[in-house]
Image (cartoon, grey):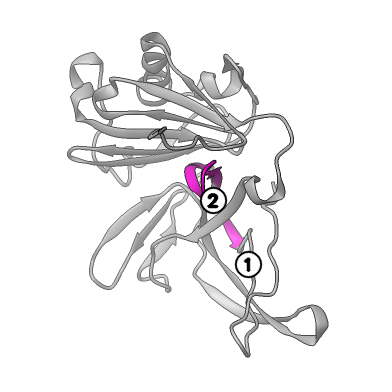
């Protein structure tokens, strides 16, 4: 009997060398420039230069977020927000719980203490419809109203958000309050069209060869964006029934 879980379909994951892990951390935190590994790719993961990049870093003493639409990062540890300081050179890597550097095409994950790292992206080749990766979008934290959430000045978007409880976050994206409006849908139904600030994710599925059961086995972050919800499903305002799904647009 095989007790190993089935692997995700449509996904390529490549383990990084120690030198590549160090290069990612140096680019993002020390030099403050684009992650070159996402631009060049490695192994069987192709690069995609010039596309936007984002950062979510969980540290033992805080969190660092950032956005890099061009050549340089704007991070939450920099003024005027001054969140938790970034991890320094090798002796400071113990502070890392997880670092995610990602763009629409690929994601780099560095694990606890920078002991290992991986890059993941779509794998080429056809898949059955029920195993194709699915794009999803999730509303980011932040209460509506300028007293709670706002975008800071600067060429690269950075937003400060709060909940009524006092929970605070610095998000590497231009902020938009959540709202919804009815929109005519197919067959005379009315859909709820949601707008706000979103984290986008791609889910990968696996199929149990014995039972045929299908479930999500892996996900990677693909971006942050503001505006209309970029993925389905949509729901009928009157009944709550699902109307349709929409693919992620870039």
Q: Which residue is mark 2?
A: 214
Q: Quadrant of residue 61?
A: top left
The picture places residue 184, in percent across and down from the top left corner, at: 76, 82
Q: Is residue 229 above or below residue 223?
A: below
N-terminal of the pair, mark 1 or mark 2, is 2
The span shown in magenta is 203-227
The picture places residue 100, in percent across and down from the top left corner, at: 41, 35
SS at circle 1: loop
Q: Is residue 165 above or below residue 62?
A: below
Q: Is residue 201 above or below residue 120?
A: below
The picture places residue 182, in percent across and down from the top left corner, at: 67, 83
State the residue at coordinates (64%, 30%): 123
Label total for image = 2
Q: Which residue is mark 1?
A: 233
| Viewer-proximal residue among 217 and 152 | 217
State the residue at coordinates (60%, 51%): 135
């Amino acid at each position: 009997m095989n007790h190993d879980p089935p692997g995700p379909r449509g996904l390529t994951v490549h383990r990084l060398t120690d030198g590549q892990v160090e290069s990612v951390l140096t680019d993002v935190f020390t030099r403050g420039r684009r992650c070159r590994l996402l631009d060049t790719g490695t192994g069987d993961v192709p690069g995609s230069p010039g596309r936007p990049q984002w950062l979510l870093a969980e540290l033992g003493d805080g969190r660092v977020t950032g956005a890099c639409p061009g050549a340089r990062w704007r991070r939450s540890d920099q003024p005027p927000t001054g969140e938790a300081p970034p991890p320094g050179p090798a002796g400071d890597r113990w502070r890392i719980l997880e670092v995610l550097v990602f763009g629409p095409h690929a994601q780099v994950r560095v694990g606890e203490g920078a002991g290992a790292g991986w890059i993941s992206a779509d794998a080429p080749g056809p898949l059955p419809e029920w195993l194709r990766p699915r794009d999803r979008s999730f509303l980011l934290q932040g209460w509506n109203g300028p007293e709670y959430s706002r975008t800071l000045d600067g060429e690269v978007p950075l937003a400060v958000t709060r909940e009524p409880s006092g929970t605070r976050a610095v998000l590497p994206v231009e902020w938009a309050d959540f709202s919804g409006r009815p929109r005519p849908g197919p067959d005379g139904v009315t859909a709820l069209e949601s707008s706000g600030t979103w984290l986008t994710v791609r889910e990968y599925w696996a199929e149990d060869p014995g039972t045929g059961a299908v479930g999500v086995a892996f996900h990677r972050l693909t971006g942050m964006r503001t505006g209309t919800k970029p993925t389905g499903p949509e729901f009928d305002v009157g009944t709550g029934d699902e109307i349709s799904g929409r693919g992620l647009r870039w």
